[in-house]
């Protein structure tokens, strides 16, 4: 019998709605109303209809979670705001210090005084992979990894297979919404996966975190779909055109989110899986009590955690507290005491880093600790070895600092048999034979060889790493062969390599050589922030490199900057400034930059259009711009510009794009269909609070920056 297409379309929509509801009840609320067999029957019926009428298959259909064909490769996603990392607390005293700092900072910002108690929200710190999910008009459209905090990898195809992440939000959800959360693999699923890999003769995953990351970062989404990944969502990164509020089926459009606790409830109401193990704490004492309780019962969870995250509850207080270069001032991660194990020190060797630092490293009998096998651990420096009296042959207690980095805690001297040997720091570098010296007042010994191959090699490895220039396919082994054969002497030489240079290396085929040439070429026009970080300047991390790039616009203007100009950037302190000045005083470093440029690497912005004068040396285009030092928020859409173009324009003119309005905001730019940010701006102006806030429409904004609306911006 022939089915009526209209009836089939209506039936398909009813099936999709039923499957979404039952999927939410099963995966998020853990309250199934139908059996697995009944659910599967509904899914089969929907798949049959969609196969018969492909035009009825929608992107948010439950049938699309199983994964399609492999993706062509990972694209990149620019996050709407920087995804900062957290400072760590390892003791109750650290938490009390955090509380004191918060109260002090708020007092200075004109908020709650140092004598007032601060409310907090304590959430479990899931040991998984940080992800973001973007929704437009209620539909999931993009997923990404954290990446460097500003840019991540596009994993939409894999993330949509995670059944606890909704593909469609309920009616009344914000037209544009970006959330942050954690994807993880439950312990039972991890154990099952490793058993299967062991039976297949495949390498085992070290821990559930690595397994989750490895599953999501697959080009074939069917791999992620088969691995039973889960998620918890805990933060709204960006919301436009409506409030994040309401219950699962119907959203209250007028509810204002004013606290972290309320934000979590709203995320739950929108259908996201939010961890129920969270606690509202009236003061730091309640926070400490909650941390103590989970230190004892963490093993009872079906997933791994490595601590708790403590957040100031008030959103207004969070905005007032702001952030440092790498971390917010309003949150901290309390890390559990590290899991420990006992093993034996087979040997102690030294490793030479890219800055010449010579680090003793213990070679250990392999032992499993905190979910992975450890065979070496850093000993940091000579003083630490002496203080802990660690000898070659000793039985030692090891742990993972923050459950991540292996370290030796102490030596069990009572178990010595008499054959143990003290460690002596070598006087010559094992890589180049140059003298190893320890500057007075410093704990770290350094190789003095200006041409030390270890320093060059480690410097190049850092230069090509994912957070820096990200040259795909260029691993340590190929770098070592390029150095050994004299094809390069430093990272600048990579941009002067030819196809024949690479093809002549041992075990290098035609296709591999061509791929590497293309990978190098693709990075010649990388963002300036990546290049600054890749230089390996001491104390300059990814976040600081991005700030310097936005402020100065080119390496040459950065090289000419003064100490005062550098420290005028809010998150650049004296230590970073001194390190930058020292780097650019070295003639060898300036020569390195020159050879990068001769190799085609772009070290600055394009020349200004329309004959506009370039900034003077030491003055950035950004610092000279009409938005210099201003915080700018866009709400709605501008007729001639997309959101990303607006943010790039604001940054290029010296401003700082922001996703939220506070009394510290300078401009709110109002486009078509503005959202709640306009209401928030009006509330601030009406409150009488001291602020420089101005509300501008599109024409006023273009007039402010000295450009018309018809210039094709």
Image (cartoon, helix red, strand yellow):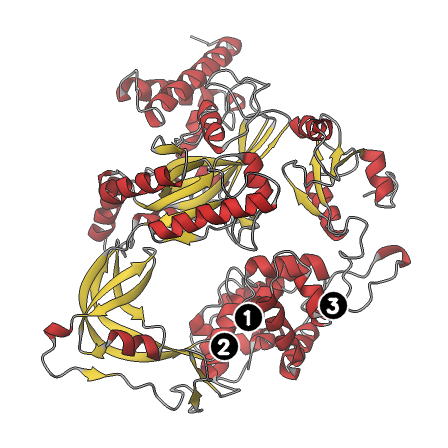
Distance from label 1 to label 3 (Cα)?
18 Å
Residue 274 image offset from top left, x and y in percent: 40, 31
Q: Earlier in the sequence, mark 1 or mark 2?
A: 2
**Residue at numbered disc 1:** 536
Helix, strand or loop at label 2? It is loop
Q: Are marks 1 and 2 in contact (CB under 8 Å)?
A: yes
In the image, farthest residue toward the front:
115
Dot 1, how many residues are within 10 Å of its Cα: few (below 14), some (14-19), or many (20+)? some
Residue 157 image offset from top left, x and y in percent: 47, 40
Q: Quadrant of the N terminus?
A: top left
Q: Are marks 2 and 3 in contact (CB under 8 Å)?
A: no
The residue lying at 38 percent from left, 18 percent from top is 45
Q: Are marks 1 and 3 in contact (CB under 8 Å)?
A: no
Helix, strand or loop at label 3? It is helix
Q: Nearer the viewer, residue 371 or 562?
A: 562
713 sits left or right of 664 in the view:
right
Helix, strand or loop at label 1? It is loop
In this view, 240 is above or below 654: above
In this view, 439 is above or below 137: below
**Residue at numbered disc 2:** 355
Q: Nearer the viewer, residue 665 or 648?
A: 665
Quadrant in the rendering for residue 30: top left
**Residue at numbered disc 3:** 557
Distance from label 1 to label 2 (Cα)?
8 Å
Q: Nearer the viewer, residue 119 or 374?
A: 119
Q: Nearer the viewer, residue 641 or 84?
A: 84
Residue 160 image offset from top left, x and y in percent: 45, 35
């Amino acid at each position: 019998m022939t089915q009526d297409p209209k009836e089939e379309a209506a039936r398909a929509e009813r099936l999709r709605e039923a499957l979404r509801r039952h999927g939410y009840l099963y995966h998020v609320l853990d309250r199934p109303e139908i059996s697995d067999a009944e659910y599967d029957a509904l899914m089969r019926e929907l798949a049959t209809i969609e196969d018969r009428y492909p035009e009825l298959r929608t992107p948010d259909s439950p049938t699309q979670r199983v994964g399609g064909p492999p993706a062509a490769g990972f694209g990149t996603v620019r996050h709407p705001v920087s995804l900062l990392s957290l400072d760590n607390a390892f003791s109750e005293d650290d938490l009390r210090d955090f509380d004191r700092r918060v109260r002090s900072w708020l007092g200075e910002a004109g908020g709650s005084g140092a004598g007032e108690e601060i409310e907090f929200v304590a959430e479990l710190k899931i040991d998984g992979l940080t992800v973001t999910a973007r929704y437009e008009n209620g539909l999931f459209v993009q997923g990404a990894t954290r990446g460097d905090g500003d840019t991540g990898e596009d994993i939409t195809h894999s993330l949509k297979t995670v059944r606890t992440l909704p593909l469609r939000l309920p009616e009344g959800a914000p037209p544009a919404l970006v959330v942050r959360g954690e994807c993880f693999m439950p312990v039972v699923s991890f154990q099952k996966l490793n058993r299967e890999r062991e039976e297949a003769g495949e390498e085992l995953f070290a821990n559930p975190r690595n397994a989750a990351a490895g599953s999501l970062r697959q080009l074939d989404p069917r791999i992620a779909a088969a691995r039973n990944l889960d998620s918890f969502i805990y933060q709204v990164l960006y919301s436009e055109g409506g409030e994040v509020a309401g219950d699962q089926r119907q959203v209250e459009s007028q509810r204002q989110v004013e606290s972290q606790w309320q934000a979590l409830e709203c995320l739950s109401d929108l259908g996201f899986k939010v961890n129920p193990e969270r606690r509202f704490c009236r003061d730091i004492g309640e926070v400490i009590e909650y941390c103590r309780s989970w230190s004892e019962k963490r093993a009872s969870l079906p997933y791994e955690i490595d601590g708790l995250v403590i957040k100031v509850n008030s959103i207004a207080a969070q905005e007032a507290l702001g952030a440092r270069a790498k971390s917010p001032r309003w949150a901290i991660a309390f890390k559990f005491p590290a899991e420990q194990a006992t093993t034996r020190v087979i040997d102690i060797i030294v490793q030479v880093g890219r800055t010449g630092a010579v680090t003793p490293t213990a070679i250990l009998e392999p032992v499993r600790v905190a979910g992975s096998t450890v065979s070496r651990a850093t000993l940091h420096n000579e003083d630490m070895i002496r203080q802990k009296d660690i000898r070659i042959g000793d039985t030692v207690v090891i742990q993972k600092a923050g459950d991540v980095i292996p370290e030796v805690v102490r030596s069990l001297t009572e178990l010595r048999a008499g054959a143990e040997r003290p460690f002596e720091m070598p006087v010559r570098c094992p890589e180049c034979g140059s003298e190893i010296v320890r500057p007075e007042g410093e704990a770290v010994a350094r190789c003095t060889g200006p041409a030390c191959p270890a320093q060059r090699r480690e410097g190049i490895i850092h230069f090509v790493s994912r957070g820096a220039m990200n040259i795909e396919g260029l691993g340590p082994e190929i770098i070592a062969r390029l150095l050994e054969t004299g094809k390069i002497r430093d990272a600048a030489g990579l941009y002067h390599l030819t196809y024949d240079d690479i093809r002549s290396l041992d075990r290098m085929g035609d296709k591999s050589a061509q791929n590497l040439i293309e990978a190098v070429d693709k990075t010649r026009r990388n963002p300036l922030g990546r290049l600054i970080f890749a230089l390996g300047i001491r104390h300059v991390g990814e976040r600081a490199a991005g700030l310097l790039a936005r402020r100065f616009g080119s390496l040459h203007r950065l090289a000419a900057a003064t100490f005062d100009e550098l420290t005028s950037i809010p998150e650049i302190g004296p230590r970073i400034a001194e390190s930058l000045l020292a780097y650019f005083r070295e003639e060898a470093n300036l020569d390195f930059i020159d050879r990068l440029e001769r190799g085609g690497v772009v070290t600055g912005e394009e020349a200004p259009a329309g004959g506009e004068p370039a900034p003077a040396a030491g003055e950035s285009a950004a610092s000279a711009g009409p938005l210099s030092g201003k915080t700018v928020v866009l709400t709605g859409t501008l007729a001639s510009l997309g959101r990303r173009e607006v943010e790039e324009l604001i940054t290029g003119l010296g401003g700082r794009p922001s996703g939220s309005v506070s009394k510290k905001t300078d401009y709110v730019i109002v486009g078509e269909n503005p959202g709640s940010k306009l209401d928030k701006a009006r509330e601030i102006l009406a409150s009488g609070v001291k602020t420089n806030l101005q509300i501008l429409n599109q024409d006023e904004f273009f007039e402010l920056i000295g450009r018309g609306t018809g210039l094709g911006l």
